[in-house]
C-alpha cells in the first residue's frame, strides 16, 4: 500500500508486535485471574514526525489519508521503506539463491509451530537465526531459535506462534524484508491539523494504528 509506505518512511517511530490481547477477571474473593483473550495477531502503530512535515509539501499525503476507508483491507511490506529493513531483514547464512530454493517439506507430528523446509545446502549452520521473519501463504511468523540444516538439506524451524494450518508441501517461502502482511485494516486514523508556531507544520490528533486479521 503506497500510503502506508509513505507514512512509515516519514515516521518518527514504528511499533509492531504479534502479542495476544490479555484480559483479567476478578472473583468474589477479589482474587485476580489473568487469561489470554485472543490468539496472536499482528498490530502496527505509526507515529509521524510532527510538526516537521509541512503542509505545502505533504498536502497530497493528507488527502490520501482523508480518502482512506478504514473498512477496506490492504497488503503491505517494508521492501519500499529502506530505513525499516533492519527490523525484518534476513539474518541467516543462506544466499538469496539458496533461500529461493527452499520449499515446505512434509509435516512431522501435529505441532503447527514446527515448519519443515527442504532444499538447503547440507549441514549448513545458521540457516535461520532467532528473530528471522518467514512467510508461507498469508501467514507471517518469526523464528524462535537458530536453525541449521541436516545432512539431507532439511531445516526444522520452531516458530513464534502456531500456523492456522500446515502449508502445502512444495510451497515456496518468503523471508526478511520481502514478507507481506495481508488483510490489514486501519483501526485508528488521526485527523491532521496545522501548527503556525512551527512554520505551517502538520500536526496529528494521535497515532496511526492498524491490525492484520488472523492468518
Image (cartoon, helix red, strand yellow):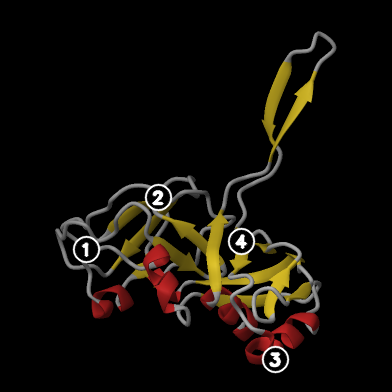
Q: Nearer the viewer, mark 2 or mark 4?
A: 4
**What is the residue that sits farthest to the front in this orientation?**
197
Q: Are marks 1 and 4 in contact (CB under 8 Å)?
A: no
Q: Residues within 10 Å of mark 1 (few under 14, many from 20)?
A: some
Residue 162: percent from left, percent from top? 52, 49
Foreground residue among 186 and 35 = 186
Q: Are marks 2 and 1 in contact (CB under 8 Å)?
A: no
Residue with the mark numbered 3: 60
Foreground residue among 77 and 100 = 77
Residue with the mark numbered 4: 44
- Counting residues from the start of the chain, the first of labels 2 and 4 encountered is 4
Which residue appears at 57% of the width and 52% of the height? Answer: 18
Q: CA distance from mark 2 to mark 1?
A: 16 Å
Q: Which mark is residue 108?
A: 2
Q: CA distance from mark 4 to mark 3?
A: 23 Å
Residue with the mark numbered 1: 153
- Counting residues from the start of the chain, the first of labels 4 and 3 encountered is 4
Q: Are marks 1 and 3 in contact (CB under 8 Å)?
A: no
Q: In this picture, is 85 found above or below 123? A: below
> Is residue 173 something one can see in this rendering?
no
Q: CA distance from mark 3 to mark 2?
A: 52 Å
Q: CA distance from mark 1 to mark 3?
A: 50 Å
Q: Quadrant of the C terminus?
A: bottom right
Q: Nearer the viewer, mark 2 or mark 1?
A: 1
Residue 88: percent from left, percent from top? 41, 65
- Counting residues from the start of the chain, the first of labels 3 and 2 encountered is 3
**What is the residue that sits farthest to the top in this orientation?**
29
- Counting residues from the start of the chain, the first of labels 1 and 3 encountered is 3
Amino acid at each position: 500500500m503506497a500510503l502506508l509506505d509513505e507514512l512509515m518512511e516519514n515516521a518518527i517511530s514504528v511499533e509492531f508486535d504479534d502479542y495476544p490481547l490479555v484480559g483479567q477477571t476478578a472473583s468474589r474473593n477479589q482474587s485476580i485471574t489473568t487469561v489470554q483473550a485472543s490468539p496472536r495477531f499482528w498490530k502496527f502503530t505509526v507515529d509521524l514526525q510532527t510538526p516537521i512535515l509541512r503542509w505545502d509539501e505533504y498536502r497530497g499525503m493528507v488527502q490520501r489519508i482523508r480518502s482512506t476507508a478504514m473498512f477496506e483491507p490492504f497488503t503491505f511490506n517494508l521492501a519500499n521503506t529502506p530505513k525499516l529493513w533492519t527490523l525484518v531483514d534476513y539474518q541467516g547464512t543462506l544466499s538469496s539463491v539458496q533461500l529461493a530454493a527452499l520449499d515446505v517439506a512434509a509435516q512431522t507430528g501435529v505441532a503447527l509451530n514446527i515448519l519443515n523446509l527442504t532444499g538447503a545446502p547440507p549441514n549448513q549452520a545458521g540457516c535461520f537465526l532467532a528473530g528471522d521473519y518467514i512467510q508461507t501463504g498469508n501467514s507471517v511468523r518469526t523464528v524462535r531459535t537458530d536453525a541449521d540444516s541436516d545432512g539431507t538439506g532439511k531445516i526444522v524451524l520452531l516458530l513464534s506462534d502456531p500456523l492456522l494450518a500446515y502449508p502445502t508441501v512444495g510451497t515456496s517461502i518468503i523471508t526478511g524484508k520481502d514478507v507481506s502482511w495481508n488483510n490489514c485494516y486501519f483501526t485508528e486514523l488521526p485527523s491532521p491539523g496545522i501548527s503556525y508556531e512551527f512554520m505551517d507544520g502538520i500536526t496529528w490528533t494521535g497515532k496511526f494504528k492498524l491490525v492484520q486479521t488472523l492468518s
